[in-house]
Image: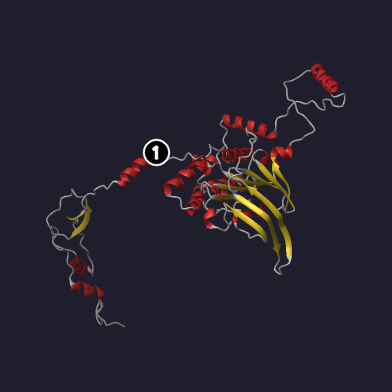
């Protein structure tokens, strides 16, 4: 069950912001440089270190445009953007960022392992680190049973899962998730929210962009609400969502007489101005009900061909990455200079008795083959250092006349006639 992210935002006021946007605007123009659309207008906000920040708004409100400007994929028409105190186009900054776009563009002919290995190589990770992280991420997103299938055979939700793993392969300091739960089933959605909460607790800075407000509400510390490219509201969940004119009291089940007595107390204390507005039994959320059904099915070992429940969060994302078992021994063995045995020697062994050829070319073939069976031409074989070397055998020789016969001379052929 997702624990609501009610913890107060990390105190990063003294540290430099991870992202700082000042009076940011972006205007798209057509071929004739006429204004076509104003995607972002005079937008200012900052994302503090170790903070889960929500960027909310309906479709077309400027969320994806703002993210692309932060990534350096688009240049702002006006205003200033800094990421880790540097321009977003700085290549060194990009090594510290993980990005999940709104639509995952993956190489369809690669499988899950090859996809993650490709992106890990872009960050110049060594082989052992790549393999360790790939194993952990694939298990985390629940694709262990489909890791060798081509991505083109994945459902949209499964492609979204591998996209999330790709965004985490470099263990980023700043993670940008644009609509991360799009296409995911309730199980995957719950897992992504749990992952965001866990990474936030571990000190990652996360920008979460979504129009699914329930997903954001469970995860973020602060949020900005956009509409028409402009900032409409900014603040924490508590400051923006708390209702000030009502009080909620939750108790065990009460009978009608007790409720009437409580209502009477409220009326007497408030002079009849206030009373119990509504009495209802708490209702389970549909998400919780759905997950209970899934858990019961798994407990019954019912098979499924889709993505499975994800495993624990990858250890390298939690700062607990450790060498795999045996790595230390291998490194010590490879570090020591091991004396190799002497080079293999070349020994000669007799070839089996050749088969005599018959026919008009018998003389030519016969001259190429030794006439004495016991002194047949030796052949070289590679053997180990313990293989005894027999006494030297006579080297094979080739008669120049035989080569001339095979090559043929001008004016002379098998039929005795000249060349045409």
Q: Quadrant of the N terminus?
A: top right
Dividing the picture into quadrants, the one containing residue 82 is bottom right
Residue at image x 42%, y 49%?
127
In the image, is residue 359 above or below residue 136? below
**In the picture provided, is 120 more to the left or to the right than 240?**
left
How many marks overall? 1
**In the picture provided, is 41 more to the left or to the right than 347?**
right
Residue at image x 63%, y 60%?
75
Residue at image x 76%, y 35%?
243
Q: Nearer the viewer, residue 251 or 189?
A: 251
Q: Secondary structure at mark 1?
A: loop
Residue at image x 57%, y 55%?
86
Residue 115 coordinates in the image, percent (x, y): 51, 50
Residue 264 coordinates in the image, percent (x, y): 84, 19
**In the picture provided, is 85 more to the left or to the right than 260?**
left
In the image, is residue 49 above or below residue 367? above
Q: Nearer the viewer, residue 41 or 167?
A: 41
Residue 187 coordinates in the image, percent (x, y): 62, 37
**Residue 140 in view:** yes
The residue carrying mark 1 is 325
In the image, is residue 249 above or below residue 369? above
């Amino acid at each position: 069950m997702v624990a609501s992210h009610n913890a107060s935002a990390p105190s990063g006021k003294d540290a430099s912001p991870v992202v700082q946007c000042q009076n940011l605007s972006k205007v798209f123009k057509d071929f004739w440089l006429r204004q076509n659309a104003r995607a972002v207008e005079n937008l200012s906000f900052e994302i503090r270190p170790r903070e889960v920040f929500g960027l909310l708004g309906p479709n077309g409100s400027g969320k994806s445009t703002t993210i692309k400007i932060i990534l350096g994929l688009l240049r702002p028409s006006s205003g200033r953007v800094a990421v880790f105190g540097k321009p977003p186009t700085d290549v060194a900054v990009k090594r510290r960022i993980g990005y999940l776009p709104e639509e995952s563009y993956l190489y369809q002919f690669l499988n899950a392992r090859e996809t993650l290995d490709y992106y890990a190589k872009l960050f110049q990770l060594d082989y052992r680190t790549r393999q360790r992280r790939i194993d952990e991420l694939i298990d985390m997103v629940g694709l262990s049973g489909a890791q060798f299938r081509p991505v083109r055979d994945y459902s949209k939700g499964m492609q979204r899962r591998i996209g999330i793993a790709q965004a985490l392969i470099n263990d980023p300091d700043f993670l940008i998730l644009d609509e991360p739960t799009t296409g995911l089933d309730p199980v995957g959605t719950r897992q992504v929210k749990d992952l965001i909460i866990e990474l936030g607790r571990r000190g990652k800075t996360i920008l979460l962009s979504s129009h699914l407000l329930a997903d954001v509400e469970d995860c973020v510390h602060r949020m900005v609400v956009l509409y028409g490219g402009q900032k409409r509201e900014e603040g924490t969940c508590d400051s923006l969502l708390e209702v000030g004119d009502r009080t909620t009291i939750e108790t065990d089940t009460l009978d009608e007489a007790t409720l009437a007595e409580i209502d009477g107390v409220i009326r007497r204390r408030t002079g009849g101005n206030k009373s119990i507005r509504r009495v209802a039994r708490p209702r389970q959320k549909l998400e919780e009900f759905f997950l209970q059904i899934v858990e019961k099915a798994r407990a019954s070992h019912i098979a499924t061909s889709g993505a499975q429940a994800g495993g624990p969060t990858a250890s390298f994302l939690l700062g607990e990455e450790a060498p795999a078992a045996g790595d230390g021994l291998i490194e010590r063995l490879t570090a020591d200079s091991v004396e190799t045995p002497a080079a293999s020697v070349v020994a000669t062994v007799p070839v089996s008795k050749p088969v005599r050829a018959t026919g008009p070319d018998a003389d030519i073939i016969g001259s190429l083959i030794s006439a004495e069976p016991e002194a047949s031409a030796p052949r070289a074989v590679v053997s180990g250092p313990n293989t005894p070397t027999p006494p030297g055998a006579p080297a094979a020789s080739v008669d120049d006349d035989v080569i001339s016969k095979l090559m043929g001379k001008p004016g002379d052929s098998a039929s005795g006639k000249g060349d045409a």
